């Protein structure tokens, strides 16, 4: 099962996965299942995170201090761990977003050049 | 469905818990993780059920995600090493140390991923750094490390010399005048090295000693460890016989006895009172000096002004007095003595040299040459590694570009790449230190005699510090350019070119330049090694005039007190040589007062009958004279050219005879037959009425090299029978050398000789046991060391150059695969492809060779003084080495060139 987009580089996979997770917890706190569902639905099913990719990544990001998880009990719902972006995480996200845009733009330039 | 709505159902918790059995995290954290994952699984299950799946199927699909060991492994990893492998360098601000530890981990991982690459890099570094560390440690030991003498720059060695610069020892009355008129030295001492017989309890032993004035201790500036050193009172005639011991002798011979001061020991048959022990740092005049004896008791025996009885001076300059000022002052003193005693001191000057210079002068050119050579090896190694790192940086370009795109600062990327090369060079350096340690152990085990303080050679703190600094510098030198180049990313280009490998042109040019530099450096080094080897071959081809094989020599000195009587002295030696010759296994045995290659002995002017007597101004021909037993020349296999050897009939009662060498015949007789003619080298009454003592020439032998293989002064040689001792030996009898041509080992013959001597006189020790081959090998010790080391470094340089050329050519072939494919598709033959690749490689090599020849021409002049009968611009060596390097270049590019010819055009184009 593909757990990220099909780019060749391992580092890149991680980089993009982080970017996705950080983006999703930017606006508001979300729990793991929600994050996985959002990635899948918003990518139209192209990207899918399984448990073995998602949770280790969340724990790593948390250890690095980019996100923080808290157990939240909402009425009539079960106890879930919600992750929220930290101030450090926000800076990282900004840096990664701009890097990513450059990257995508570059890819675009190249691929359009190749097909010109 | 669970009853408690706030927790996932126990069913899911148990299922997840079972599957994550081996998580290895603290229990509380484990509960948390299982809760969270179980919740996820349950959410998924609920969703699947809602989609209308059956219970079994929903359960199976939901749990599929947690099956297998991967989840547990991944979680455990992220829990264990939270800072490991952050994919984006420089995203968050980190501390320097945080960056460092991250970079080190990253570097270690990338080393593990490329074990062959890492092994090549580390191996190269270990060899190059090891060579540098070894030579540095020898240089440091021999001349850089502080000497045990405080302010050694104030220590000056003195002797007398003729105006023409011929060195002499110091005349005793002259020295007394120096002391009286001295204004520049704080201490001024005089000494004479002398081996002495120490008898204390049982075996007699020959030890190295020195007769020294109190000024010697002042000049050395080292206080005694126990008791006192020699004092001015010991310098006066009639002073008591006392002795100062070396630290080594005190420990080895007297078991470090703390009560030694005041005890009597027997030296040369006379009791001496030990007054002190010097610390280990006192190694003057030689590191082997074990006992210092006072001047006073010997003063009466010193000859008058004009005679130079083997005394040498040492002084310590007053603070603030420069060497030049001291020299000027002593020149004045010498001129004053000269005008006062023109007869004896006409043309006698004072020679001074800083003591440090005296110690290091003979070894310094060699060490500097070797330091230069290992520096070259390291530079070649760096060029090689820079090349490898650049090639790798090119391969990594897409990855690095991406990192940069994802926000890594360039500085951080450089830092990380540099960390990698630093780590490699530190590991290589550590191995290099091991190699160096091994090398210098080998060197020390060969007991070289020409390297100062070789007994102290070790990898110490200074050498380790040097190694660390050198390793770090090396890592920066070979890593910096690749790091800068590698970090200068152009994402568009690097991704566009990824996989196609059309390298950045600038980088390719830089790598070619590195190979050119490498070849040039290797050529320079190899030319140096080649010259040294040719010189060494010349050196070993020198005919010493005798056959050193199977000849064992040893010395014996009779104490003058017991053997004052000449007849007794002669009788001892006659008996000795008779007994040694009778030892089974000894073919021939003889005695001589001087040993070949040992540095000469006693010289005097010599004339043939009818020629003008020598005068002080015109000494004429000088000869080395030797007292010899009948079979000495036979034992040494010195060829007899005319006449006869001595026999037992040449005694004190028979006619005075002499054997001369062929150089004497040429100088004194020209083409005339010398046999039966008379010569004289013993001339009494030189000043008033010269009286030559004539001897008849009975034999002519080949000239024997006495002063060294290469530096033979133009002295002719004469031999006289030991029973007809030259008058010059009346005052001071020579220590005779026993020479035995034998099939026995040196140890075996020494034992036998020792027993024979003991049966004549048990108080006489033998010493200086050596084979004649050892004498020969000692005189070529430094050249041999130079050849072995420089040859080794040259070979290393050649190997590195080979690797460098191979690396560049093969990576160029790899990156031109497409081009080559197109060429072949367009009809290029394999032959023309081969020419293309080889041509490129040869262009690099030839450029390097041309530059190297230019550099070598400029640099080999520093070898001039180390070369024997080879020009430092020897064309044969230059041409041979240049051709050899071109051959190596072709060899190194042959494999990649052949690979290029096998390019399949279809494949090559498809890759593009």
Image (cartoon, rainbow, N blue to C red):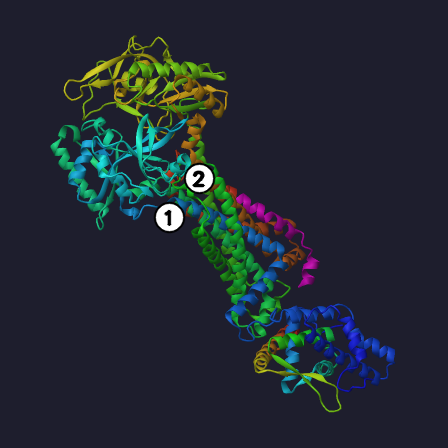
The picture quadrant where one finds residue A31 is bottom right
Residue that label 2 marks: B786
Q: How many marks?
A: 2
Q: Quadrant of the C terminus of chain B?
A: bottom right
Q: Residues within 10 Å of mark 1 (few under 14, many from 20)?
A: few
Provide residue B6's location: percent of width, then percent of height.
Answer: 75, 86
Q: Which residues are magenta?
A: B886-912
User: CA–CA distance between discs 2 and 1?
Assistant: 20 Å
Q: Which dot marks residue B760?
A: none
Task: Look at the numbered discs 2 and 1 and tell me whether their residues touch, using CB distance below 8 Å.
Answer: no
Provide residue B471's location: percent of width, then percent of height.
Answer: 48, 55
Q: Residue at x 30, y 11 (%)?
A: B652
Residue that label 1 marks: B144
Q: Residues within 10 Å of mark 2 (few under 14, many from 20)?
A: many
The outermost residue toward the bottom is A75
Q: Residue at x 44, y 42 (%)?
A: B528
């Amino acid at each position: 099962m593909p757990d990220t987009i099909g780019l060749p580089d391992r580092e890149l996979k991680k980089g993009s996965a982080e970017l996705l997770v950080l983006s999703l917890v930017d606006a508001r706190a979300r729990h793991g299942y929600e994050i996985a569902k959002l990635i899948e639905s918003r990518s139209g099913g192209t990207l899918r995170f399984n448990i073995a990719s998602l949770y280790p990544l969340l724990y790593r990001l948390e250890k690095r201090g980019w996100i923080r998880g808290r157990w939240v009990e909402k009425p009539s719902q079960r106890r879930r761990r919600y992750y929220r972006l930290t101030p450090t995480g926000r800076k990282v996200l900004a840096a990664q977003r701009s890097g990513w845009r450059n990257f995508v733009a570059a890819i675009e330039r190249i691929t359009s050049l190749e097909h010109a | 469905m669970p009853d408690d709505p706030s927790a996932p159902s126990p069913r899911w918790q148990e299922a997840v818990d079972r599957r994550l059995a081996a998580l290895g995290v603290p229990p509380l954290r484990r509960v948390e993780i299982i809760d969270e994952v179980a919740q996820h699984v349950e959410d998924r299950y609920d969703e699947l059920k809602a989609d209308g799946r059956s219970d079994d199927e929903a359960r199976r699909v939901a749990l599929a995600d947690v099956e297998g060991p991967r989840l547990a492994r991944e979680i455990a990893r992220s829990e264990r090493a939270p800072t490991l492998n952050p994919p984006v360098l420089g995203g968050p601000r980190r501390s320097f140390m945080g960056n460092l530890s991250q970079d080190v981990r990253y570097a270690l991982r990338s080393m593990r991923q490329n074990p062959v690459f890492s092994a090549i890099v580390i191996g190269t570094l270990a060899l190059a750094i090891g060579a540098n560390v070894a030579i540095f440690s020898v240089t440091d030991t021999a001349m850089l490390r502080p000497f045990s003498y405080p302010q050694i720059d104030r220590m000056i060695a003195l002797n007398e010399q003729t105006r023409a610069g011929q060195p002499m020892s110091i005349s005793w009355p002259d020295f007394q005048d120096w002391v009286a008129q001295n204004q520049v030295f704080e201490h001024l001492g005089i000494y004479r090295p002398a081996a002495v017989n120490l008898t204390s309890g049982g075996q007699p032993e020959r030890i190295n000693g020195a007769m020294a004035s109190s000024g010697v201790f002042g000049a050395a500036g080292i206080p005694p460890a126990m008791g006192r050193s020699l004092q001015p009172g010991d310098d006066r005639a009639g002073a008591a016989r006392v002795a100062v011991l070396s630290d080594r002798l005190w420990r080895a011979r007297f078991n470090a006895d703390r009560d030694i001061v005041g005890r009597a020991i027997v030296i040369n048959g006379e009791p001496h009172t030990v007054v002190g022990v010097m610390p280990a740092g006192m190694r003057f005049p030689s590191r082997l000096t074990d006992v210092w004896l006072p001047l006073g008791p010997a003063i009466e025996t010193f000859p008058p002004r004009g005679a130079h009885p083997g005394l040498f001076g040492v002084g310590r300059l007053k603070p603030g007095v420069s060497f030049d000022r001291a020299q000027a002052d002593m020149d004045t003193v010498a001129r004053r003595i000269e005008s006062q005693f023109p007869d004896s001191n006409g043309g006698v000057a004072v020679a001074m040299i800083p003591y440090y210079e005296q110690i290091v002068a003979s070894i310094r050119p060699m060490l500097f040459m070797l330091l230069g050579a290992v520096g070259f090896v390291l530079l070649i190694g760096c060029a090689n590694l820079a090349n490898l790192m650049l090639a790798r940086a090119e391969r990594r370009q897409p990855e690095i570009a991406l990192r940069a795109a994802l926000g890594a600062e360039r500085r951080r990327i450089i830092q990380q790449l540099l960390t990698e090369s630093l780590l490699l060079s530190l590991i290589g350096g550590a191995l290099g230190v091991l190699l160096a340690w091994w090398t210098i152990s080998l060197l020390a085990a060969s007991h070289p005699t020409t390297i100062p303080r070789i007994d102290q050679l070790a990898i110490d703190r200074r050498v380790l510090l040097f190694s660390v600094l050198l390793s770090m510098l090396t890592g920066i030198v070979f890593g910096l350019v690749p790091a800068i180049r590698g970090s200068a990313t152009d994402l568009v280009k690097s991704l566009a070119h990824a996989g196609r490998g059309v390298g950045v042109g600038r980088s390719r040019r830089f790598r070619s330049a590195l190979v050119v530099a490498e070849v040039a450096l290797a050529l320079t080094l190899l030319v140096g090694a080649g010259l040294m080897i040719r010189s060494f071959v010349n050196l070993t081809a020198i005919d010493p005039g005798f056959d050193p094989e199977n000849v064992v020599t040893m010395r014996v000195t009779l104490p003058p007190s017991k053997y004052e009587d000449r007849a007794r002295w002669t009788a001892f030696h006659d008996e000795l040589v008779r007994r040694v010759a009778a030892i089974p296994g000894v073919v021939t045995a003889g005695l001589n007062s001087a040993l070949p290659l040992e540095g000469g002995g006693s010289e005097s002017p010599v004339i043939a009958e009818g020629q003008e007597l020598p005068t002080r101004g015109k000494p004429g021909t000088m000869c080395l004279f030797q007292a010899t037993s009948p079979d000495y020349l036979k034992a040494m296999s010195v060829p007899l050219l005319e006449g006869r050897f001595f026999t037992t009939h040449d005694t004190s009662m028979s006619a005075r005879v002499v054997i001369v060498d062929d150089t004497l015949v040429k100088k004194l007789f020209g083409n005339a037959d010398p046999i039966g003619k008379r010569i004289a080298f013993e001339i009494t009454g030189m000043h008033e009425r010269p009286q030559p003592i004539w001897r008849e020439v009975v034999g002519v032998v080949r000239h024997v090299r006495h002063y060294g293989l290469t530096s033979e002064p133009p002295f002719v040689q004469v031999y006289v029978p030991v029973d007809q001792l030259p008058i010059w030996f009346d005052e001071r009898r020579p220590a005779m050398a026993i020479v035995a041509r034998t099939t026995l080992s040196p140890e075996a013959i020494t034992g036998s000789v020792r027993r024979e001597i003991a049966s004549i006189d048990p108080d006489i020790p033998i010493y200086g046991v050596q084979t004649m081959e050892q004498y020969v090998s000692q005189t070529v010790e430094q050249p041999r060391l130079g050849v072995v080391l420089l040859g080794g470094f040259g070979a290393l340089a050649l190997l590195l150059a080979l690797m460098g050329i191979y690396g560049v050519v093969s990576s160029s072939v790899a990156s031109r695969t497409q081009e080559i494919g197109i060429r072949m598709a367009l009809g290029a033959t394999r032959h023309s492809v081969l020419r293309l690749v080889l041509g490129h490689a040869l262009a690099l090599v030839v450029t390097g060779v041309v530059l190297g020849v230019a550099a070598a021409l400029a640099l080999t002049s520093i070898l001039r003084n180390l070369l024997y009968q080879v020009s430092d611009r020897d064309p044969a060596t230059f041409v041979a080495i240049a051709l050899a390097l071109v051959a190596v270049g072709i060899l190194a590019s042959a494999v990649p060139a052949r690979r290029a010819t096998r390019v399949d055009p279809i494949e090559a184009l498809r890759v593009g």
